[in-house]
Image (cartoon, rainbow, N blue to C red):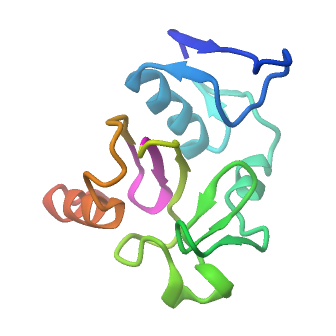
Amino acid sequence: MRHTLLEPDASGSFVGCSYCYATARDWARFGLLYLNDGVWNGERLLPEGWVRWTASPSGIHNIEDFNGEYGAFWWVNTTGGRGSPAWRNLPDVPPDCFSCRGLDGQYIFVIPSKDLVVVKLSQDRRFQDPNLMLYSLLKAFPVR
């Protein structure tokens, strides 16, 4: 990532889940690092197994907001709230999709089965249904 600013919170601590500002290309590079299992330009930057662990269900659900399940720093699409695939947040998107979600509707989606990273930075979570947006992209631009 080349144009990124990571700021501490008011107490001086780096939160990790917020206060990180980057360009769309830099967020896409972050997604590509995870798409490529932590390897960048042939060099392993993340420990082997890290990406699999972060994109695996942890058992923590957020039924009210996302009907999704949290992995480790990523939301996963393998199961939904209460562990049921019927409750998946992105029912029309491959179940191997995992994502970062910003407070105001920003997203990084990684879909390994489609060899795809999608970044959405617009700040309006009501503007677009992420399931419909990804479904439409996958339908319009079939990959793999």
Q: Residue 44 versus residue 138: which sits nearer the camera?
A: 138
Above or below, comparing residue 108 to residue 112 in the picture: above
The image quarter in which residue 64 lies? bottom right
Q: Residue 38 versus residue 13: which sits nearer the camera?
A: 13
**Residue sitting at x 74%, y 32%:** 16
Above or below, comparing residue 47 to residue 132 in the picture: above
Q: Is residue 89 shown left or right of residue 51?
A: left
The image quarter in which residue 23 lies? top left
Q: Is residue 111 shown left or right of residue 33?
A: left
**Residue sitting at x 44%, y 42%:** 104
- What is the x, y in percent for residue 29? 49, 28
**Residue sitting at x 59%, y 35%:** 33
* Magenta segment: 106-118
Above or below, comparing residue 50 to residue 80 in the picture: above
Residue 108 in magenta?
yes
- What is the x, y in percent for residue 118? 37, 44
Residue 20 in magenta?
no
Above or below, comparing residue 44 to residue 4 in the picture: below
Q: Is residue 9 shown left or right of residue 2?
A: right
